[in-house]
Image (spheres, rainbow, N blue to C red):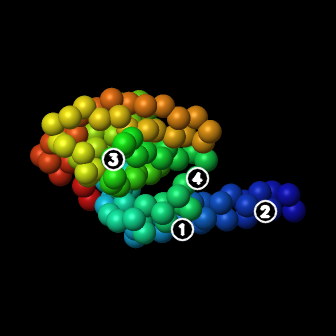
Amino acid sequence: GDHRDLHRLIRRQRQMCIRDSIELIKSGRYFRLSPSTMMVIGRNKEENERFLQLVKGEDTYLYVDGYKGSVAILRREIRKQLVILAAQILAWYSEAPKTENLKVVCKLGENSSLINVKPAEMSIIEKFLV
């Protein structure tokens, strides 16, 4: 009874999580920031809009403040250090000058914060691009 129902529920949640992650990976540039943290960056307006529909409560959603460009979703284990790295990578993909300090908005649920970063160098970005 109850024991099997719980296992069924857990299995269904895992399948939904995997399905959502696959949808996310299919739509954008995929980065592995750590063994347990992925980031996906939109490549165009359609992907950016699609990401808004795929953001989950535990995801961090990022965009560069004041410039057109990509948005990103960070998923799974999220530490401050990885959010800063994600913001630097995302800043490189924005239309902002690559030499400026940029404000990146990071949203987790109802909370949001600004991080000031310089765009990452391509040599760093390539280490994480899958």
- Picture quadrant of residue 48: bottom left
The three-letter amino acid code for the residue at tag 1 is Arg
Residue under label 2, please give it.
4
The mark nearer the N terminus, 3 or 1, is 1
Label 4: state its secondary structure. Answer: loop
Whichever of labels 2 and 4 marks the residue nearer the N terminus, that label is 2
Q: Position of residue 86 (x, y in %)?
A: 34, 42
**Which mark's residue is nearer the viewer, 2 or 1?**
1
Secondary structure at badge 3 equals: loop
Note whether 101 is above or below 92 in the view shown: above
As shown in the figure, which amino acid type bears the numbered disc 3?
A: Tyr
Report, in whole angstroms, how far the alpha carbon at label 3 lies from the one at label 4: 24 Å
What residue lies at 37% left-to-right and 60% top-to-bottom? Answer: 42
Alpha carbons under labels 2 and 4: distance apart:
27 Å
Residue 67: which disc?
A: 3
Q: Which residue is mark 1?
A: 19
